[in-house]
Amino acid sequence: MKLNHLLAPALLGLVMLALWEALVVGFDVPQVLLPAPHQILQALVKKWDVLWPDFQQTFFKSVLAGFFAGSLSGFLTALVADRFDFLKRGLLPLANLAGAVPIVGIAPIMVMWFGFDWQSKAAVAAIVTFFPMLVNTLAGLQAVDAMQRDLMRTYAASHWTTLLKMRLPCALPFVFNALKINSTLALISAIVAEVFGSPILGLGFRISTEVARMNVDVVWAAITVSALAGSAFYGLIAYVEKKLTFWHPSFRT
Amino acid sequence: MTNPPPTAYGRPLKGATLAAQRSRFRGVHSISFASMLPVLVVTGTVFVLWYAVSLWLNAPQVIERFDAKPYSFQELATGTWNMERPVLPTPHQIARNFFESVFTEDLDSPRNLLLHAGVTLQSTLLGFAMGVILGVLIAVQIVHSPWLDRSLMPWVVASQTIPILAIAPMIVVVLGSLGWPMLVPKAIISMYLCFFPVTIGMVKGLRSPDPLQMDLMRTYSASKSQTLSLLRLPASLPFLFASAKVAIVASLIGAIVGELPTGAQSGLGARLLSGSYYGQTVQIWSALLMASLLGVGLVSAVQWAQHLTGKQMGART
């Protein structure tokens, strides 16, 4: 059963890769338009000593710092807003409004404020990841049954005990949902921010400069690196989620 | 069945409760002062903080200009809040720039924000339409084939970990060099971002009909396509609209990022980029304001479409 779950997508992936290779080679598609998978792999191996520092710069500095800063501050803000109803009713409509706004656009401003290095990218990632976490955590803290709430009241549990023992565990699936959204969001926004100016490092920088030089195979290699990083990051969070929220209906099969 | 909550069915109630009931049914349209007060207070706080931060961030440059002469706080404040190229422009500066670039500039002038917003809107809408169609098609395939569900679904999820926004410039440059108009590559990027929420939502939506209802369709010996058009699609509409609200914002972001490479002359993204090249912070902020208004407007449009469709189908809202 488990194996079958992996086999089907893997098979389809291989078929798609083979089709891609066959079409590109067969129709003699110019490399500028779309390189074949083997060319991308070659570029990946050949340029690894360039791509690895790029990856470190983008992922370990910008993305992780921004992801943790944004998610943590979103989570803490949600806890405070949950404590004070007035604040919650004021913040929630604005946070929802922020969902309709292309926040990535603040990238040029952050680059002006925090300079070209990773701090500006982390700032963009932090702001972009703040709102999904705030909205989801607040929704999660509300997702408690009236019956369960009453039970805690009968135990005369304090606000903090109720929060720790009941409402936070109940909110975990929502928090993880936000973390999963944020994992790809942080990566994307950091890469976009690098287009507005960066030191001579970073996946976004590499992509924009190699496009200008028409080295499309290197560009695709950089894309492969960031796609793998994004998937791995997402997978890691999904794994932790499975371990921590095993009780949730979506994991009980 | 247990007693349904009265609000869900709109049971007529008597007297004053009826009026209250009615106003609750109007939902979005009835905004009371009591619900607006916290929002206004928080918004007000944000504005006050904004002026304070802008005073703090812009002060060094203004103090430098005083050239060691003594100055009052009032002079400092008016100086920092009305700078030509501030680190953080104040809301009134952004508003002034916004109104000037919308109303006083000629419509075909490159300084007019409406022109840029129009260019961005075009590719947003085209990409949104393509993305919704693609997303619904994929969802229909997935729902009808267990094999595709297992093999394609993980790839749909994985596709979103590819930073399409990062390759957006490349798509634009490459397709542009082949002589495609700017609109198409931007719309393709928007489509790629759009189809994901639609697919995820529609797979859920198409599966949302009750087993009882599905059985009824079987008793009528309805074909697969009849079940799809008569039961599954109508049942999935709330899911479609919920995803469409997410998708149209994603589409807008895709269009803006697609305009970032230097090839683009017009569009909100190009405006952002030129603002960042020339240090025109006020211009960046007013372009951001326009993008935000566009986003809010598009989401409201989807909401309105949902309202109309609901009315058409006899929903009581």
Image (spheres, grey):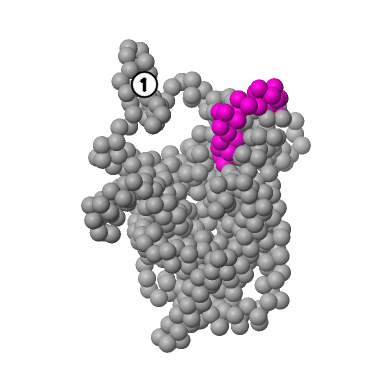
A232 above or below B43? Answer: below
State the image coordinates of residue A67 (x, y, percent, origin top left). 66, 51
The foreground one among B70 and B133 is B133
Q: Quadrant of residue B302?
A: top left
Identify the residue at horizontal 39%, vertical 59% (top origin).
B143
* Rendering quarter of residue A116: bottom right
Q: Which residue is mark 1?
A: B21
Q: Amino acid at mark 1?
A: Gln
- A239 above or below A148? below
**Is residue B211 shown in magenta?**
no
Residue drawn 69% across and 22% down?
A: A156
- Residues in magenta, as a range: A134-160
Which residue is outermost to the top?
B15
The x, y position of residue B20, in whole percent, is 37, 18
Q: Nearer the viewer, residue B117 or A232?
A: A232
Quadrant into which the C terminus of chain B falls = top left
Residue A91 in sight here: no
Compare residues B62 and A43 and report the one nearer the observer: A43
Local secondary structure at mark 1: helix
* Residue A25 vs residue A142, the one in the foreground: A142
Image quarter of the N terminus of chain B: top left
